[in-house]
């Protein structure tokens, strides 16, 4: 990423400082869409791109491909092609309880991932936090939160620019993006919240494109177009809608259910691109998780099961289908419990996303990652 691109991201973050609080339900509402300066889209090495309502026309999204029967799986499971791309999806505030409320036809993409991949509805957040930013930084660094225990140190959750992950941790911190970059790959981040601009700020050379776009439809259009045209090694897509609806109207409220349906439609669009673009088909895995659940209009307490219970699913060529814990003897279903990071048989956590993605790509794990369940999961075919 160019220095100018970094500055643009920083400007996007700073433009919102003071007008947005945390997403813990105690502060002001999170950003709503509309203001042109809300979108900070950058592109490197080309001239930084800026999207927003001031832009008269949107480049057309590639034609939505038809829905193949099995877009994330190799036609011959015995000889899967190497995985060259990973689409990592975080659905902000997605509680597994929603799948008890919404029928299969209402969330077909989520259901398909769970059916075709290795998944669980009983994964865990970071032990220390059920807030958005600490968990997302964990997803890409593979680290716990507490810096005294080797964590990433990002324990805040508002949109104010407080520095990089490295500043928070008090030293160098590698990430999914930096490992991919060192291997010659590329990464793109599409997020609905300004706070996740910390990815591009912290790894400016490794995050090749960082788009902050609060409008889910616009975000979906940009992400699917980029995935189809540029085919990054890693595409990280953050869908903010369910969390925002949860804070505004309550978890599992009609508005929340609508937001989950909308998120599912975006996931379906991403899956269709994967199945339709020849360079992606049979070479792409999808990893989906969440940063926290929630109840009422909050998700602050990290000791509350409704907050720390999240889904985690990985699907792609060579990845077996089934219950993730049954497929992974080294892991243990935590039941209703809240195991520590030193558990002999850990649960899968949000912070395992980075090493899961890297394992799928046959790249080394993130250095100093403390979340190590990926090594215990059936992600490689040898
Ligand atoms: Zn929230």
Image: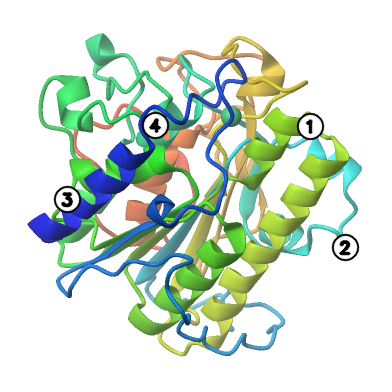
Mark 4 crowdedness (10 Å alpha carbons): few <14, some 14-19, many ≥20: many
Mark 1 = which residue?
A: 249
Gap in Å between the C-alphas at discs 2 and 3?
A: 43 Å
Relative to 302, residue 89 above or below = below
- Position of residue 89 measured from the top left corner of the image (x, y, whole percent): 52, 53
Counting residues from the N terminus, which is met first, the one under dot 3 or under dot 1?
3
Mark 4 = which residue?
A: 159
Residue at left offset 48%, top offset 80%: 58
Judge by depth and name the residue closer to the eye, 130 or 357: 130
Mark 1 crowdedness (10 Å alpha carbons): few <14, some 14-19, many ≥20: some
Element under disc 3: helix
Element under disc 2: loop
Mark 3 = which residue?
A: 7
Label 3 CB-ligand 1 distance < 8 A: no
Judge by depth and name the residue closer to the eye, 365 or 237: 237
- Position of residue 133 measured from the top left corner of the image (x, y, whole percent): 42, 31
Residue at left offset 40%, top offset 42%: 194
Residue at left offset 23%, top offset 31%: 165
Residues at circles 4 and 3 in contact by the CB criterion of under 8 Å: no
Per the rendering, the mark at residue 343 is: none
Gap in Å between the C-alphas at discs 2 and 1?
A: 23 Å
Mark 2 = which residue?
A: 105
- Position of residue 256 measured from the top left corner of the image (x, y, whole percent): 77, 41
Gap in Å between the C-alphas at discs 4 and 3?
A: 16 Å
């Amino acid at each position: 990423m160019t220095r100018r691109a970094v500055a643009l991201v920083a400007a996007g973050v700073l433009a919102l400082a003071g007008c947005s609080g945390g997403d813990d339900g105690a502060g002001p509402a999170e950003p709503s869409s509309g203001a042109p300066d809300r979108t900070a889209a950058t592109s490197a090495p080309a001239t930084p791109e800026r999207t927003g309502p001031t832009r008269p026309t949107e480049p057309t999204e590639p034609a939505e491909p038809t829905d193949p029967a099995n877009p994330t799986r190799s036609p011959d499971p015995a000889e899967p092609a190497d995985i060259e791309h990973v689409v990592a999806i975080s659905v902000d505030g997605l509680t597994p309880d929603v799948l008890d409320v919404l029928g299969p036809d209402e969330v077909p993409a989520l259901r398909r991932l769970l059916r075709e991949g290795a998944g669980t509805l009983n994964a865990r957040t970071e032990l220390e936090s059920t807030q958005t930013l600490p968990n997302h930084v964990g997803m890409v660094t593979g680290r716990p939160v507490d810096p005294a225990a080797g964590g990433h140190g990002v324990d805040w959750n508002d949109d104010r620019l407080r520095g990089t992950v490295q500043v928070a941790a008090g030293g160098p911190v590698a990430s999914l993006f930096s490992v991919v970059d060192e291997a010659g790959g590329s990464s793109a981040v599409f997020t609905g919240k300004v706070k996740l601009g910390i990815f591009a700020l912290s790894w400016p050379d490794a995050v090749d494109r960082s788009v902050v776009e609060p409008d889910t439809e616009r975000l979906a259009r940009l992400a699917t177009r980029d995935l189809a045209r540029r085919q990054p090694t890693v595409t990280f897509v953050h869908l903010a809608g369910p969390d925002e609806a949860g804070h505004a109207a309550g978890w599992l409220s009609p508005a929340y259910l609508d937001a989950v349906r909308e998120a599912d439609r975006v996931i379906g669009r991403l899956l269709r691109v994967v199945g339709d673009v020849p360079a992606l088909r049979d070479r792409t895995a999808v990893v989906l998780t969440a940063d926290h659940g929630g109840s009422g209009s909050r998700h602050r307490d990290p000791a509350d099961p409704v907050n720390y219970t999240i889904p985690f699913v990985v699907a792609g060529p060579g990845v077996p289908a089934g219950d993730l814990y049954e497929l992974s003897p080294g892991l243990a279903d935590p039941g209703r419990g809240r195991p520590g990071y030193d558990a002999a048989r850990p649960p899968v956590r949000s912070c395992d996303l980075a090493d899961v993605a890297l394992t799928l790509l046959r790249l080394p794990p993130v250095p100093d990652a403390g979340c190590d369940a990926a090594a215990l999961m059936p992600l490689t075919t040898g």
